[in-house]
Image (spheres, rainbow, N blue to C red):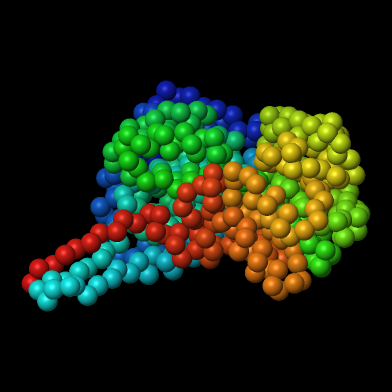
């Protein structure tokens, strides 16, 4: 673990295993930290805070830029580590390293633009000053599906703002976070500014950060269920929260869509990271006039996807993270079939020589319906249910009929419809003829139970800043 600028084991010597989800092979034993180590990390972050907050913004920016550049220099090694512990195909892991580095570069720029304001007062003898200052020590809790990018999407703005942090990567993928910690160290980050606690049990970590008044901010990416528990826990200390939670993304193909673009878009959105992204298309609504042609062409493309160990060249679909994830996919497919959906391709686990992970064959389900499990819950796997619809009003109603509101997509060539539908979708991120909208420059976050706050984009740094009003009497 990285605590106060030094690499540390757990005080009691405990470790836990990190394994390759494609082969089951043991990759590493990492320290199994608990409350004590978390407390030491918070102490270090609190000690480091005044000096880091006072470090001139250009110096903080330079450090972020240096680390971003080093990530790109080490892209191949970092991507290989990510594929080994997370399972995603190597090409996607390389892409994630570049995506992750872009958050550090973007927020390096933002560090230099943390402007305040002066506002005209209502009386002649007063001046009004508005300052933006770092919120303090922040705890960053990151998921296994994007082990590096979800960390830098939080770390970039936190460090740019002048906060110090205690990070907890997911227990499945701690190695990517530790590698990033090594690059931060190498770049000259002062001790205690970034601390990384690895643990197999998130509970002592979260209990400790919520109990400590010096931790003023928690940023979490993960399930809505856990997010709700964090909201409850944050009440006692009135801590600021940023939550990036689950989704149930609609992907709408109108009759007037460019068929090829819609097929390629659905493929990219649905099967990115083997369907394990919060912004993955979960329900593919296709208008009846284009339904048969879309289903045929899409199925052809899905059937051709290459499944296997992400380290093998040309593999496009890796393993699911674990057997629990596979069981959920199996349950969703079985429920759909039982209720009348038709399997156009896939529909079963994928098996091949040398693979011992939780692999599922990329699946297309025709004649799916909104009341099926596969459309009501986030599948988080390589299963594409095609749901027919008739009208724009109907599909907007169906698309919004969920407690989630993270990402939505639609394909149309009608400019008026493009505006109507983009405005009508109750989602934080809308891809209009764009299946991959995520980028460091744009706000990422959801409506409804998909979360609180936004990461990335011009407002991303606000999550790590307090606003202070200074009234000056002359
Ligand atoms: C996520 O699944 O939470 C992140 C995906 C992205 O950044 O595009």
What residue is rendered at 71% in x and 74% in y? 415
User: In the image shown, does 338 or 344 lie closer to the viewer?
Assistant: 338
Residue 18, relative to residue 108: is it above or below? Answer: above
Question: Where in the figure is residue 389, as x and y percent of width and height?
Answer: 80, 53
Q: Quadrant of residue 373?
A: top right
Whether residue 6 is visible here, answered yes or no, is no
What residue is rendered at 31% in x and 37% in y? 237
User: In the image shown, does 124 or 238 lie closer to the viewer?
Assistant: 124
Residue 228, relative to residue 128: is it above or below? Answer: above
Q: How many marks?
A: 0
| Residue 67 relative to residue 432: left or right | left
Question: Where in the figure is residue 160, as x and y percent of width and height?
Answer: 39, 60
User: In the image shown, does 410 or 41 lie closer to the viewer?
Assistant: 410
| Residue 79 relative to residue 127: left or right | right
Q: Quadrant of residue 392?
A: bottom right
What residue is rendered at 62% in x and 57% in y? 425
In the picture, the quarter occupied by the C terminus is bottom left
User: In the image shown, does 205 or 115 lie closer to the viewer?
Assistant: 115
Question: Where in the figure is residue 318, as x and y percent of width and height?
Answer: 75, 43
Whether residue 252 is visible here, answered yes or no, is yes
What residue is rendered at 41% in x and 45% in y? 241
In the picture, the quarter occupied by the N terminus is top left
Q: Quick one: which residue is furthest to the left in this view?
A: 474
């Amino acid at each position: 673990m990285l605590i106060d600028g030094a690499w540390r084991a757990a005080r009691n010597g405990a470790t836990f295993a990190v394994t390759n989800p494609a082969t089951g092979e043991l990759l590493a034993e990492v320290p199994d930290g608990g409350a004590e180590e978390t407390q030491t990390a918070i102490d270090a972050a609190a000690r480091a805070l005044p000096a880091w907050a006072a470090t001139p913004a250009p110096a903080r920016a330079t450090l972020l830029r240096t680390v971003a550049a080093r990530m790109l220099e080490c892209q191949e090694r970092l991507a290989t580590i990510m594929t080994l512990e997370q399972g995603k195909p190597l090409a996607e892991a390389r892409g994630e390293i570049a995506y992750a580095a872009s958050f550090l570069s973007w927020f390096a720029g933002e560090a230099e633009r943390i402007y305040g304001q002066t506002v005209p007062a209502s009386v002649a003898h007063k001046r009004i000053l508005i300052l933006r200052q770092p919120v303090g020590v922040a705890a960053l809790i990151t998921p296994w599906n994007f082990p590096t990018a979800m960390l830098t999407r939080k770390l970039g703005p936190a460090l740019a703002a002048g906060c110090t942090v205690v990070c907890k990567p997911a227990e499945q993928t701690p190695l990517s976070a530790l590698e990033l910690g090594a690059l931060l160290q190498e770049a000259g980050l002062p001790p205690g500014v970034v601390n990384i606690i690895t643990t197999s049990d998130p509970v002592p970590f979260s209990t400790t950060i919520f109990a400590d008044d010096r931790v003023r901010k928690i940023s979490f990416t993960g399930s809505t269920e856990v997010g709700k528990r964090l909201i409850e826990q944050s009440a006692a200390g009135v801590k600021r929260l940023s939550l990036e939670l689950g989704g149930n993304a609609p992907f709408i193909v109108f009759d007037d869509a460019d068929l090829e673009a819609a097929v390629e878009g659905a493929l990219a959105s649905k099967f990115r990271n083997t369907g394990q992204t919060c912004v993955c298309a979960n329900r593919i609504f296709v208008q009846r006039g284009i339904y048969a042609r879309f289903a045929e062409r899409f199925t052809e493309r899905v059937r051709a996807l290459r499944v296997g160990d992400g380290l093998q060249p040309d593999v496009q679909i890796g393993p699911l993270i674990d057997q629990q994830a596979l069981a959920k996919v199996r349950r969703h497919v079985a429920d759909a079939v039982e209720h009348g959906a038709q399997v156009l391709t896939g529909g079963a686990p994928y098996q091949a020589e040398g693979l011992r992970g939780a692999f599922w064959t990329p699946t297309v389900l025709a004649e799916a319906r909104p009341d099926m499990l596969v459309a009501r819950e986030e599948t988080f796997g390589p299963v594409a249910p095609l749901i027919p619809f008739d009208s724009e009003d109907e599909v907007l109603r169906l698309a919004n009929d969920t407690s989630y509101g993270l990402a939505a997509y639609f394909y149309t060539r009608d400019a008026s419809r493009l505006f109507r539908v983009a405005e009508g979708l109750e989602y934080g991120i809308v891809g209009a003829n764009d299946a991959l909208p995520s980028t460091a420059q744009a706000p990422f976050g959801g409506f409804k139970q998909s979360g609180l706050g936004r990461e990335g984009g011009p407002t991303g740094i606000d999550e790590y800043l307090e606003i202070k009003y200074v009234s000056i009497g002359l």
